[in-house]
Image (cartoon, rainbow, N blue to C red):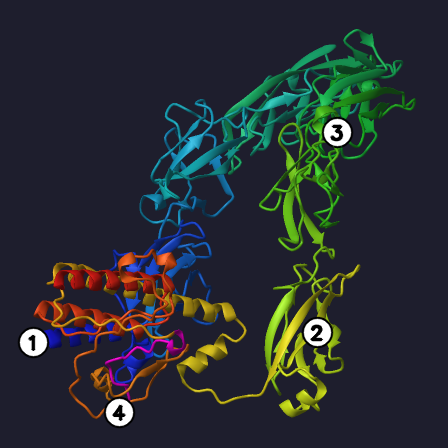
Amino acid sequence: MKNQKKKRGSIFLLVFLVTLPPSLGRQTSDYAPYFYDNGPSSTNGNMALFSISEDTPVGTQVYILNGTDPEGDAVWFGLTFEKGTREYLRVDPKSGNITLIQELDREKQGEISALVSITDGRNKVVETIRVFVTDANDEQPEFQNLPFTADVPEDTAAGSSIYRVQAVDKDMGSGGSVTYYLQGTPTTKFTIDGHSGVLRIKPGETLDFETTTLHFVTVVAKDGGGQYKGKHQVLTSTATITINVLDAQDTPPAFIGTPYFGYVYEVSLPGSEIATVFAKDGDEGNPNPIHYSIINSSEDVFTINSTSGCISLTAYPVTLRNELYEIKVKATELGPSEELLDYNAMTMVTVRVVDLNNHPPTFYGENGPQSQFEVTMYEHPPEGEILRGLKITVNDSDQGANAKFKLRLVGPGRVLRVVPQTVLNEAQVTVIVEDSAAIDYEKGKSLTYKLLAVEIDTPERFSATADIVIHLLDTNDNTPRFTSEYYIARIPENSPGGSNVVSVTANDPDSGLWGEVKYSIYGSGSDLFLIHPSSGIIYTQAWATLDAEVKSKYNFYVKAEDTEGKYSLAEVFVTVLDINDHVPEFDDSLVERTMIIGAPVRVEAVDADAESPNNVIEYSIMQAEPDNIFDINAETGEIKLKSYIKSMEIVQNITKQKDCRWSLVVQARDRGSPSFSTTAVVNIDITEATQLKGPMAAFLLQSRHNPMKALGVVAGVISILVGVTVLISTAMFLRNTKSNRIMPARRIIIRRRPPRDHKPWTFNVPFRGGGGNDPLNKFVVGDPEAGSVSINPNKNIRPRCSRSKPNPLPPRAPCLPPPSCPPLSSNPRPSERPRAAVPTVSGALASKGSRRSSQSRESNISSETTRIPVSSALVSELKRRLEQKIIESNSSYY
């Protein structure tokens, strides 16, 4: 019997603990919450030694903070960063889910420091964490010391190292290793070491300055590859190496203007200039000086200046024995120390002896005398190049000094020069380029010069002229150029798709296809824009919608490119102009507020426009009932009572309403043009400040503007209580069906009370009311006959009995229902039974099993009473089962 009482007391204690508010159990102890430490490989816990890859997409849930409170209270989580640092992560306070909110870059920041916290509302634990950012293959190799230029002598041996390139990859591991290879055709003369980046001349290849003076080699730097966003990625970079081939002394000199002719006149004196030869070193990049000499005797009547190549007469013409002389001239290169080198050339100079001046100089072409010569060539020929298309010969048929004349070009100065400048009798005319930049097709499609030949030492000064017309051919020597380095455009955000934004213009002075410019657009901000490839008009995509509230600034690049790939860039800045296209919005058209006298309440509207004044809101009271009671701050939306209203007495004097609930219509208007506005009805309950204490008061104050929160908490508590009641009732029913039958010791007397005696049911609670600071006093069993417990809607138990008796009496059996109930044998349906009273039975219990069953049922009823409110359907079901049990017991007894 004592064991049964202890067991019943334990059940009562368990039920009371379940229904006890959490705040009562924390009066004696309150421990701080703590994190779980699940190790660095876990994705939940306290983020100890946690690492994250830098290619993790923004918005990914990367970790779950996990912890607990020793008292079992709910915990909230926090994540903060030091002031001035970037916030990469954000935590959900309830679930602890940590989400990545900004892109990571290990090369810029390899470690993130933050503070994580856990709190139960009273105690807060803060821990410092370090999140390591792991590497992904997102950086391409970067060449160092650009641009790459190498000067290589043309006689450099095959296999020699001529340059070394270096590229650095900021990634780690295989993604940071760099190898090199050359991009281009297999016919290139160079090769590169894949690991060191050393550029060499291929075995069996040689350089030749006279063939090619410049080589362009494209080198590719490739990393070792690695994972990036779940895929294997290999990144490369390219750079161009410019190789200047330096001329070496490997080409002999060559005479210019051959063949050479000279004349000796009868009036010539010793020392007179007969002819001048000119030789040029074949190594044009680094030419050596030339030494001239005559290698045959020529009867010792002629001499040559070793530096200038001028051939002079050494004797009087009367001493000359021959009318025609052949002079063999040798041109030899001089070394740095004026020594003669092995590189030389030879030419013949024909000298005639004449005595009359009866012929003027005459220009000859391939078909005889000619006064105009034409040649077609490309613009910008190399300086020093000979205009080989001109076949001009000048001749004076006189002899000696009568056949000596000078050549001169008349036209734009210092662009071309003529060789030789002094002619004796006859010479091949050579025109040489001096200024390559001046020969420009864009400046003029043709050049015209006068070639003038004038005798020098004759009184007649005979002369001749010929026109030299040079027709130029265009080359792609110009790059398209924009009229501005950048363009600024503005477009309203309501512009439809396909609207013009701005027009860009680039000019290429080249002709034909080389002068045609094709426009393109690229850059991170160019997704919403297109450019016409020919006109350069930039317009929005047909599907594009510009919204200043989403993004108001765009910048991208436009490219102007000719047919050979020469291009230039310009930057375009587009500003999306905000228009007033959003109406201010309140959270709800009907706003409920509780105003404490002396304290304002606030209403707030939001305007989604991007810029001022379109998103600046002014508040005003359009209508109030009663009028002239409230003031509103036009900027903040704070509503407060007039300054003279300082108590509830003044409020009640103003209005006849006793509930002090007033309404007003508040308007929110923006400052845009046109201006938009919206209104909301604000219902304000006026009250005075009261001193509220305890956690329930704090909860009510927090929920006074959010009644749905309080209603949700109450509904949750009721649902838990109903669930516990159903579980306990089911367990007791299953137990009673297996126990001994009830055996009353005497007849059951059924007493029916008249309807006027019908009273509300009062349930006896065997627990004594809790009080004091000792939690054990809350579970002491009291006398059920000494008093009853009243249960109010706020779930507060107020004892109205004495607690002096330590030992409780057995619970009494419930009495029979009033006459209004249907007969017991009818077994009515639940829908037909009255719900006003619970049937009871009065009698003695014969067996221990029956007593135990009866006491269990009464205990069940009493315990269920302490957890009201209970649904009426559950009460009806319990009544029906109890009636059936009583009927079965009575029939077996009789």
Residue type at mark 4: give it.
Ser
User: Can you tell which mark lies on residue 664?
Assistant: 2
**Could you classify mark 3 by the number of other residues whose Cα lies within 10 Å: few (under 14), some (14-19), or many (20 or more)?**
many
Residue type at mark 3: give it.
Arg
From the viewer's perspective, is residue 469 above or below residue 489? Answer: above
Q: Earlier in the sequence, mark 2 or mark 3?
A: 3
Q: Which residue is mark 1?
A: 1
Which residues are drawn in magenta?
A: 755-771
Name the foreground residue: 495 vs 514: 495
Residue type at mark 2: give it.
Leu
Comparing labels 3 and 1, the label whose residue is closer to the camera:
1
Q: Earlier in the sequence, mark 1 or mark 2?
A: 1
**Could you classify mark 4 by the number of other residues whose Cα lies within 10 Å: few (under 14), some (14-19), or many (20 or more)?**
some
Secondary structure under the numbered disc 3 in the rendered image: strand
Mark 3 and mark 1: Cα distance apart in space:
137 Å
Q: Earlier in the sequence, mark 2 or mark 4?
A: 2
Residue type at mark 1: give it.
Met
**Which percent across, then down, holds residue 78?**
39, 68
Secondary structure under the numbered disc 1 in the rendered image: loop
Q: Which residue is mark 4?
A: 802
Q: Quadrant of the C terminus?
A: bottom left
Mark 2 and mark 4: Cα distance apart in space:
54 Å
Name the foreground residue: 582 vs 246: 582
Mark 1 and mark 2: Cα distance apart in space:
70 Å
Q: Earlier in the sequence, mark 3 or mark 1?
A: 1
Q: Which residue is mark 3?
A: 417
